Image (cartoon, rainbow, N blue to C red):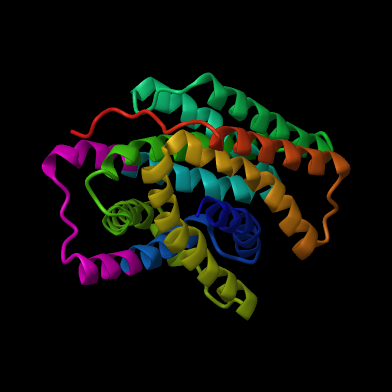
Amino acid sequence: MLLATVSLWALNFTVSKYILDHGFHPLAYSSIRYTCAALIFAGITLAWEGSLRIARRDAAMIAFGTTVLFVNQLSFVYALRFTTATTVALIFGTLPIFTALFARGSGVEHLPLRLWVAAGLSFAGVALVALGSGGNLSTNLKGDVLALAGAATWAAYSVTIGPLMRRYSPFRLSAVFLLSVTVGLLVAGSRQLADQTFHFGALVWIGFAFAVLGPLVITNLLWFTAIARVGPSRASLFANLQPFLAALFALALLSEPITTVQIVGGVAIAGGILLASRRGPVTVPPAE
């Protein structure tokens, strides 16, 4: 599940960059994309569970998760607007570090030394992938900062939903979070939506369909389920494969080269994941 999730995410960097470069405004793209995904999840949840109800005691956690996911989406699309898809993917390799810090700070997980070593090894792999791309992450500091904000907010979101998974299904949580974020995106993107034209080629619309069904619908289900089973830090460690996979997609789809240093980085990333997967069950506080 984690490998499939990260593969879809990695491909989404290239797909979303292509869509934005071919005329979709960032907020118009995000708001329409989230609206489609939210309606799909709401329909699935209502058909299977008959309700989207969330207990009042979880309202604050839902509100916080919605806020960080909203900021995450803004950071993601504008990072892609200001810099390259590969650069954004490389910077998102910092996700496990942020997640481990947030998980420890919030008390969601008590992290053993092995996971810290695994995270460090994987992060070193990310650095090698970046170095192999030319030694310069980006000439646009704005895009780099936004990509870093995207990684940090997704880590905060991952830690937030961990306890909620004890009480709600992935369908209900996905529906509630996507619907909530959609409202904010529609408001923020109203001006861009009014100015947006939709005379795109078939490839843009195919990419848009993928961006809705793959990285939002399918990965939400897989990611939620993985977090419930292995914990947020261990799950998000797999996200360090993202830069290497993104380089492979760029090689296949954009004819961009992949260097020996990048391959070594990918091996280091995989080594960190294997090291983390050998540890015992994640320690979490008892369910409330």
Asked if residue 125 lies left or right of residue 52, the reply is right
Q: Note whether 145 is above or below 239 in the view shown.
A: above
Please state the extent of the stretch shown in magenta in the rendering: 40-65
- What residue appears at the point 13 percent right and 45 percent down from the top-left corner? 55
| Prevailing secondary structure class for the magenta stretch in the rendered image | helix
**Is there any visible trace of residue 49 in the rendered image?**
yes
Query: Was residue 34 drawn as part of the magenta stretch in this picture?
Result: no
**Residue 235 as seen in the image, left or right of residue 183:** right
Question: Which residue: 63% across, 58% down?
Answer: 11
Question: Relative to residue 119, is residue 93 depicted above or below?
Answer: below
The residue closer to the viewer here, 33 or 280, is: 280
What is the x, y in percent for residue 198?
A: 52, 75
Residue 92 drawn at (x, y percent)? 59, 40
x 75%, y 55%: residue: 248
Q: Is residue 56 magenta?
A: yes
Question: Residue 253 at what x, y percent from top left?
Answer: 75, 64
* Image quadrant in which you'd find residue 71: top left
**Quadrant where the C terminus lies?**
top left
Quarter-wise, where is residue 119 in the image? Answer: top right
> Which of the two residues, 91 or 78, is positioned nearer the viewer here?
91
Drawn side of residue 211 relative to residue 58, left or right: right
Q: Position of residue 259 (x, y in %)?
A: 86, 45
Q: Tell me: residue 121, above or below residue 195.
A: above
| Residue at the far left in the pictured view | 56
Q: Is residue 139 visible?
A: no
